[in-house]
Image (cartoon, rainbow, N blue to C red):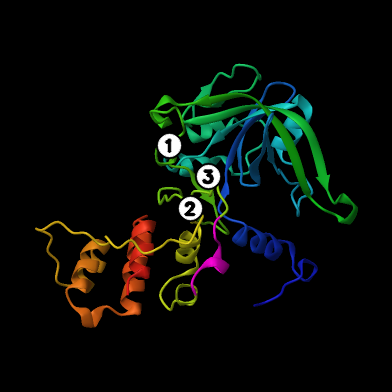
Amino acid sequence: MKTIFPADLGHRERHQLLLGGVAPRPIAFVTSADSEGQVNLAPFSFFNAYSSRPPIVAIGPAIGAKSGLAKDTLLNILATQECTISAVTYSMVHRVNITSAPYPASVNEYHKAGFTEAKSSIVSVPFVAESPYALECKLIQNIELRRDIGGNGNLMMLEVVAFHVADSVLDEAGNIDPARMDLVGRMGQSWYSRANSLFKAVQPSHQPIGFDGLPEHILHSPVLTGNDLAQLAYVPILPMLDGSFPQFPEEFKADSIEIELAAGNPMGALFAMMQRPALRTELMRHRIAQAFIRNGMIDEAWQTLLLV
C-alpha cells in the first residue's frame, strides 16, 4: 500500500486524492441570497448531517485555492445567516451541473438551469421545487479551517428549521423510501454514483457471537467472504443442527447444483446435493450456504454449514 503525505502534493492532486476515497458524498444543492436579495444556487459535496436534536447539517464552501476568492454561497450565508438545501436526484443531476459554472453573482442559476423556486416557510430564500426533499436552514457557526497554514476550507454548521418532503417518496409507514428518492452521490473527478442499487444491513440489537465465536471450519472457509462471515456472526448464540433440516415438498425437483446456484436458488442446490452423497463435501456446503446468505436466509445458511 502506498503512503502519501499531504504536504508532498499540489492542491489539485491533494483535492482529488481526498475526494476519490471519501465517497460517495451527498450533494447539498444550496440556495442563498445576498443582502440585496439576489438569489444564488450552487451544489456542494462537502455536506452531511451531524445531529438530529436539534437537526444540524454542515456544508463546506471553500475559498478558491487559485483565485483566493470566496464562493458566493459562503458570503451570502455569512451576510444573511440562512439558506436552503435541496437534495439532488438522478433526474436533476445534469441541470445541477449547469449551476456549478462560474456565473457572476448577478446571475440567477434557477433560470440558467430551468429550476423552479419554491417558497420557504421560515427563511427568506426559496428551495428547488423539482427536488423531493429540502431543508430550510439557519447558520449556527462558521469555522475557518486552518487559516494559520493557508487553509481555504470552511465548515458552516446549519440548524434545520423546516423540512419539505414530497409525498411520493414516502412509504406507507411515512418513512422516506430510498428507491423513490433516487439520490446521486459525488465521487472523485467527474464521477457520480446513483443510489439505485440498494441493500439492507441491519445493525444487531443484541450482542453477536462475533468472528471469534465462529467454528474454525467456517472462519477459515475458502468460499465465504468477510461480509458472509459477518452475517453468520450476527447471531446471539451459536446455532445447533436442527434434525428436521432440510425439508422439501414431495413434488420438489432439482438435479444440478451448478444450475441452481447460478439461478440463485440455494434450496434447489441443496436438494441436488442431498441426492448425490459424493457431492456432500464441506466446500459444496459452503457454496450453498453462501447462496443462502446472499438471499438473506441466515438460518438456512447455518443449518447447511452444520450438515455432515
Residue of label 1? 177
The residue nearer to you, when weighing 186 against 303, is 303
Which element carries disc 2, helix, strand or loop? strand
Q: Is residue 100 left or right of residue 290?
A: right
Picture quadrant of residue 7:
bottom right
Looking at the magenta stretch, what is its main secondary structure? loop
Q: How many marks?
A: 3
Which element carries disc 1, helix, strand or loop? loop
Residue of label 3? 97
Region of the chain picked out in magenta, as a range: 208-215
Kindly identify which numbered label has been placed on residue 193. Answer: 2
Q: Earlier in the sequence, mark 2 or mark 1?
A: 1
Q: CA distance from mark 1 to mark 3?
A: 25 Å
Q: Is residue 62 left or right of residue 224?
A: right
Amino acid type, mark 1? Asp
The residue nearer to you, when weighing 47 against 203, is 203
The residue lying furthest to the front in this view is: 243
The residue nearer to you, when weighing 259 against 66, is 259
Q: Earlier in the sequence, mark 3 or mark 2?
A: 3
Q: Look at the picture and state if 52 lies above or below 295.
A: above
Q: Is residue 306 left or right of residue 95?
A: left
Measuring 69% from the left and 36% from the top, which residue is drawn there?
Answer: 73
Front label number (3 vs 2) = 2
